[in-house]
Image: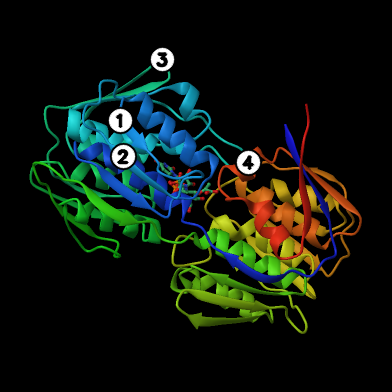
Amino acid sequence: MDRFKIEGGRKLEGTVRISGAKNAALPAMAACLLTNEPVHLENIPHVRDIITMAKLLAHMRCRVGSPDIPPSSFTIQAETVSHAEAPYELVKTMRASVLTLGPLVARFGYARVSLPGGCAIGARPIDIHIQALEKLGAEITMEHGYVEARTKRLRGAEFRFPKITVTGTENVLTAAVLAEGETILENSALEPEVTDLAELLIKMGAKIEGVGTSTLRVHGVDRLHGATHTIIPDRIEAGTFLIAGAITGGELLLTNCEPAHLAAVIEKLKACGIDIRCEGGGKLRVRAAKKLVAGDVTTEEYPSFATDMQAQFMALATQANGVSHIRETIFENRFLHGSEMARMGANIVMDGNLAVVAGPTPLSGAPVTASDLRASAGLVLAGLVADNTTWIDRVYHIDRGYEQIEEKLRSVGARIERVTQP
Ligand code: EPZ
């Protein structure tokens, strides 16, 4: 199992190219199941979840080709899908496998997908995905740990999401595009990854109105065709590097990003005193604060502050002057990194969904354990400012969603290495 060894205390300076968004690439890859023609996807990050989705599509007998290693583009052709099943072995390593449910049942009238279990950050049920697909006419049964969906053809319907769900909106949207008649999805997620998916579907021939709003109106079509699409930049990777530049007292230029998708994060970091400038052409420059001050953050759905940036903000808060209040409203158990940061000397008191961080406190390098993808990113940031050596265990979590993080950090001056244990 790999670990990271970080020698903290180095200012990060230089340029970092932001990769494509994993959470946009995953639904885009699943959407390739909707047509028998090839779909070409560009700006795909080379991360473990993408490899898992590629394996899953190959398991379903799709042709998945990538001309370059590591992949930044994929051509996926689901000409024949002889195996409309997402098995437990793959779903347990990546719950986004559930994104194949909607497209499979819409195109083939049948899908069998293992139920994802809970994960380190919360229970994460898929009840709303199921309710919505039932509303579209799918007959759904759950047996032996699998969801089975059957239909002759899905029918358009009106559905109001009782709670905003990102992959729920994506799953149902990719089903509705091939349903007969009109579907109206209310209280849909507004995340840029949902909009990116809708834009791909429109290129494939889908008829969708209201893209970028909470009401999506879909006029089902009989078939979709191939398309070429470039995945949006990863706003969470960009946000993580903004904090990396600021927390180490350095200066970074981030290229290939979409500042508009980071508005809430940029606003919050600026309020903490960090100098962030949009330089046009997808570039963001971050310079450390003269005096870093505490800030309060509540995670909420887009366009508010993302839960996927909460752990990284907590690392920053340990170095800020004053008391920061961090409230997590999306997932019920997303503070495990807080206890690890406390082991490094941070002053963090957690009570339910509220973490109160008093700073600044010098962090001292320690062995810590990553519990999920973004927690790992938070711990890497903490390690970058800690004295001596920080060892981070279970970095397979970070490999799920950050492309070459240690290479990118090293290229701007961090001392971080991957140590592979036999
Ligand atoms: C997506 O997860 C992201 N994953 C997550 O990214 C992200 O943290 C999350 O959205 C919130 O922004 C992908 O896009 C692949 P939700 P998702 O459904 O869709 C509850 C990362 O680190 N809910 O929007 O699974 C749910 O339990 C990650 O990259 C139900 O109750 O999140 C949660 O409390 C992790 N029933 C809330 O809704 C349902 O049927 C929002 O979850 C569905 C969701």
Q: CA distance from mark 3 to mark 2?
A: 30 Å
| Disc on the earlier residue, 3 or 2 | 2
> Is residue 291 visible in the rendered structure shown here?
yes
Name the element at disc 1: loop
Going by the numbered disc 4, the residue's amino acid type is His
Number of the front mark, 1 or 4? 1
User: Label for residue 144?
Assistant: 3
**Which residue is tagged 2?**
76
Are the two marked residues, 1 and 2, in contact with CB atoms closer than 8 angstroms? Answer: yes
Residue 359 at x, y = what percent? Answer: 82, 69
Q: Residue furthest top?
A: 144
Sooner in the amino-acid sequence: mark 1 or mark 4: 1
What residue does disc 1 label? 62
Which tag is nearer the camera, tag 3 or tag 4?
Answer: 4
Q: For the point 44% across and 73% down, which residue is it?
A: 260
Numbered badge on residue 3: none
Mark drawn on residue 397: 4
Bin the neighbour count of mark 4 within 10 Å (Cα to Cα): few under 14, some 14-19, many 20 and up. Answer: some
**Mark 1 and mark 2: span between their CA atoms?**
7 Å
Q: Earlier in the sequence, mark 1 or mark 3?
A: 1
Location of residue 421 with respect to 284 vertically, above or below: above
> Observer-nearest residue: 144 or 108?
108
Which quadrant holds residue 407?
A: bottom right
How far apart are the alpha carbons under marks 1 and 3? Answer: 25 Å
